[in-house]
Amino acid sequence: MPYEWISPIPAGPEAPLHELHLWPHRSLPRRGFAGFIAGTFILLLLPLFPALGTDVLWGLLPFLMGTLALLYWAIQRSYRDGEVLETLRIWEDRVRLERRARRGPAQVWEANPHWAEPRLHKTGGPVENYVTLRGAGREVEIGAFLSDDERVDLYRELARYLPAREMFR
């Protein structure tokens, strides 16, 4: 699961009661990436064997190696763009959601935990089972990069840690 509840170490009155870290899933880990590039390199060399010793080799080689370089660059770019970490911290008196992406400043949302409400939008959002947190006059998304099932599980866990205040609705 690309999210994890962290047990904070009590370090005083400022330590959160609960902490959640969310990150995008990586279907191709770094180790697999190295194997994929090596395998692609070997497969790209196969059409060059019949051309060894001919002028055709020098015509094909730049295109095949350019393809490999472009593939390498695109996957590395995907890794960099996917370096997103969402952190939800819950204290007695406040809830703080912080989203850090590789580019741009951190995005922060804070609210009182007694009024913070997790919401699951089964339809009508940008994706199915869209999860948001509502409070302090704003509604912010959380875990948009998770799969549908993971978002439903996340909503259930958020509802447990941020129980809805039925009497005030």
Image: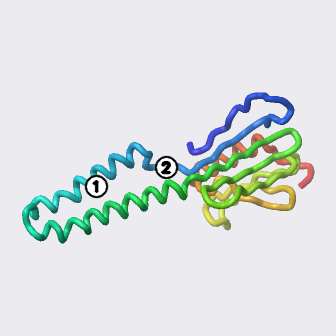
Task: Check the picture and name the quadrant holding the N terminus.
Answer: top right
Residue pointed to by mark 1: 40
**Residue 32, quarter of picture:** top left
* 10 sits to left or right of 51: right
Q: Find residue 120 and report its horizontal and vertical position in percent.
A: 71, 56
**Residue 62, quarter of picture:** bottom left
Above or below — where is 80 with respect to 34? below
Q: Give the class, few, some or many, for how many residues have Cα within 10 Å of label 2's Cα (few <14, many ≥20).
A: few
Q: Find residue 56 and report its horizontal and vertical position in percent.
A: 13, 70
Q: Nearer the viewer, residue 46 or 168?
A: 46
Task: Check the picture and name the quadrant holding the C terminus.
Answer: bottom right
Circle on res. 26: 2
Residue drawn at (82%, 61%) of the image: 138
Tag 2 near tag 1, CB within 8 Å: no
Amino acid type at circle 2 is: Arg
Q: Find residue 108 and report its horizontal and vertical position in percent.
A: 76, 55
> Mark 1 or mark 2, which is nearer the start of the sequence?
2
User: Cα distance, mark 2 to mark 1?
Assistant: 20 Å
Q: Nearer the viewer, mark 2 or mark 1?
A: 1
